[in-house]
Image (cartoon, rainbow, N blue to C red):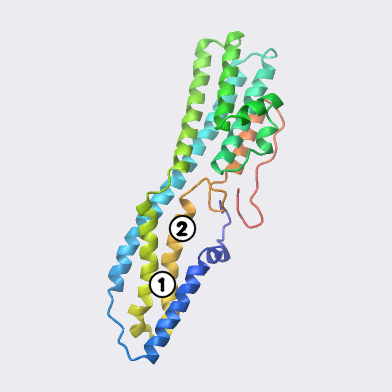
Amino acid sequence: MIVAKIPSSRRVFQEIWRPLALLFVWDVVVTITYYILPFKAPELPITLFGSALALFLGFRSNSAYQRWWEGRGLWGLMINASRNIARATRNFMPDPEASDLKRQIVYRQIAYVNALRCQLRKLPQDEEVLRLLPKHEKDLALQRVNVANGILDGTGRRIDEARRNGWIDTIQQAQMEAVLVDIANSQGGMERLKNTPLPFQYRFIPEVFTHLFCVLLPIGLVETLQFATPLGSTIAGLMFLAVLAIGDDLVDPFANDVHDLPLNAMCRTIEIDLLQCIGEEAPGPVAPDKHGVLW
């Protein structure tokens, strides 16, 4: 996620320079043709076309942003639920009998959110996951299709173990299981966003209409702008292409891109809170890189 106060125009240009360059070349061709060949430019209702296209792009951008914001809300619930499970573990289970089990549950939750991060970004499970699990549990978790869900199942078994050992009662177990249900529901919502793309019409129609509008734009403007057509048409096309690119950037909030949610930073926030909850030393928060991007 870009957190720099001043947006980078270079980054925006990198995303749309190819279609923008093609648009400029087309604008120049139309302008030269208008001056060399004896043709009258047709009167095109460019304003009407632009208004209709703006509606399409507005619907698309709003839908993409809603997906991005829903993903952020689900990760906010995950952060809160992780704090809740750690606090319940610390308060319900006695010391020193259950101290080792407390540590296991906290470590497993940290491993869980990092495993979920890797799954959502379609990356292999990294060291942030593997270092927090015993070797035999690494093997068991990695054998699951859904590694994060396997880790969460193991956490539930440890809560049941605490109940069987008499360290918590059934009411406390039910309270902790309710938090695990909230965690599982958040994961399910994230997987739904990840695995369900925008409908085809929302992706295809605005893209086709935007490029068609950019093709027709210099033809409709050449009589008015004349030799300034390449500049004016390219600037107008830039605005529509930029809005189209914004929708593409936000549609998948869990992709490993500069515009997506800072999953590394949120997983580190969970790790800091949970380790401090049980009185252990915690690492520092994740800082933005030199380009002002928080991963």
Q: Quadrant of residue 162?
A: top right
Point 53% across, 20% down: residue:
176
Percent coordinates x, y for residue 194 in the rendering = 48, 42
Disc assigned to residue 236: 1
Q: Earlier in the sequence, mark 2 or mark 1?
A: 1
Label 1 crowd bin: few (<14), some (14–19), many (20+), radius 10 Å: some
- Indicate the amino acid at tag 1: Ala
Percent coordinates x, y for residue 34 in the rendering = 37, 87
Point 36% across, 69% down: residue:
213
Vertical placement of residue 80 versus 256, above or below? above
- Indicate the amino acid at tag 2: Ile
Vertical placement of residue 287 versus 213, above or below? above
Percent coordinates x, y for residue 155 in the rendering = 58, 22
Point 66% across, 56% down: residue:
290
Label 2 crowd bin: few (<14), some (14–19), many (20+), radius 10 Å: some
Quick check: can you spot residue 110? no
Vertical placement of residue 135 versus 215, above or below? above
Disc assigned to residue 246: 2
Dot 1 lies on which element? helix
Left or right of 165, for residue 225:
left
Point 30% across, 71% down: residue:
47
Percent coordinates x, y for residue 122 in the rendering = 56, 43
Total residue callouts? 2
